[in-house]
Image: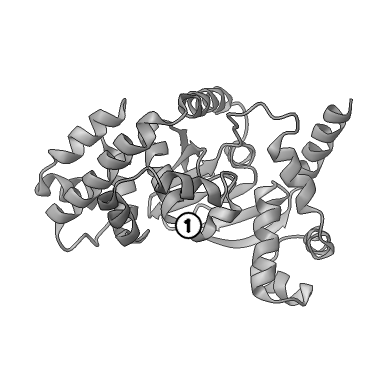
Amino acid sequence: MDYEVEVQFEPVYELVSSIHTFICKKSNKKMDLGASWSAEVAGTLSPELLSALEETELGNDWKLLNLLIYQCPEKGSVDSVLDWLEHLQVGEMYETLAEYVSVFPVQMEQFRSRMHFLLSEWNRQYFSASDPAVNSRLRQHADERRLELGKGPVSDFVNRTTNGFYFMPVDGLRKLVLIPQFHFQPANIIYSFGPLTLCHYAARVSVTDEEISPFMYRALRSLGEKSRLKILQSLGGGRKTFTEIARQAGISKGIVHDHIFNLRCAGLLHAYIEGENVTSYSLRLEGIHRMNEQLFEYLK
C-alpha cells in the first residue's frame, strides 16, 4: 500500500454519525438500532430541529462538514469543536477546505451557521444525554486497533478493522483515516477527498449484554437465502463487479444489492473501493472461519 493509515476516534465523530443515521430514515430498518430508534428520538426533538433535519441532505455540504471536523485542531470534546466552528471565519474555512476540495458552499456563512445549529442542538437534545457506554467502547476499540497498527501488512490491518474493505491506492490517495462508529452499524460511511479518505466504519461494538452476539447472528442470518449462498459460491473463483454478480445470479439488481449488503455487513465479502465507490467483490474466507469460531464458542 502506498498510503498512510490512521485510526481516530473522538465523540464529535459519533455525534455526526448519529445525525447521519437519523437523516437516513429510509435505511433505518437495515440498521442495528432499527426504525424504532429514529421514531423514539424524533419524539424528543424540538419542531425547529426536526424541520432543520428534514431539510438537510447528505450531499456535498454534509461531506464538507465532515472534512471540516476532521481538520478541527481541538477535537477533544464536542463543545470545543462547536466553539471552533462557531467562530471560524469565512476566509479560514476556505483555507481549511481548499487543500482537498475545489467546490465550496455558495454561502459560506449560512453553511457554517446551519451546520453549527444542527450539531449544537442535536448534541443538546439527544447526543449529550445518550448512553456514555457508546463513546467509551468506541474509544476502547480505537485504542486497541491502534496497538495493532504496524504489526503486519497495512492492507490486512484495514481488512480486519473494517470487516472486509480494501481501499485501492488510486486518485493520489495518501492517507486513509479509519473512524469507528456505532449508530450507523452495520453500514459504513466513506468520504473521498482525493489524497484523503475518511471511512466511518461499523466497529461491531454493542452496549447491551446479549447472550447471542448480534454480529454472529447477522452472519448466520445472512446465509439463510439460497441466492446468497450462490453469490458466495460464484465469488470463490475471484473478484467480480456488481453487474457480473447480478448477471450470474439471474435476479433483479435491487435484490442482488440487498443480498450483497447483508453478506458484506456479515463480513463474508471483500469490498474493493476506489474513491467512494465499491468496484468489485470477492469471497472473504476469514469471515466464514470467524463465524464458525463464534458459533462453536457459543455452543460450548
User: Which residue appears at 70% of the width and 47% of the height?
Assistant: 266
* Nearer to me, 42 or 70: 42
Q: Judge left or right: residue 254 versus residue 170.
A: right
| Label 1 Cα crowd, 10 Å radius (few <14 / some 14-19 / many 20+) | some
The C terminus, quarter of image: top right
Tag 1: amino acid: Lys
Q: Is there any visible trace of residue 95 in the rendered image? A: yes
Q: Is there any visible trace of residue 73 in the rendered image? A: no
Above or below for 285 versus 257: above
From this viewpoint, which residue is outermost toward the front?
Answer: 43
* Nearer to me, 156 or 287: 287
The N terminus, quarter of image: top right
- Residue beneath label 1, please? 25
Q: Judge left or right: residue 131 versus residue 222.
A: left
Above or below for 244 versus 285: below
Q: Judge left or right: residue 282 versus residue 142.
A: right
User: Which residue appears at 43% of the width and 44% of the height?
Assistant: 41
Query: Residue 105: x percent and y percent?
Result: 21, 60
Residue 229 location, quadrant:
bottom right
Query: Residue 138: x percent and y percent?
Result: 50, 29
Above or below for 230 versus 164: below
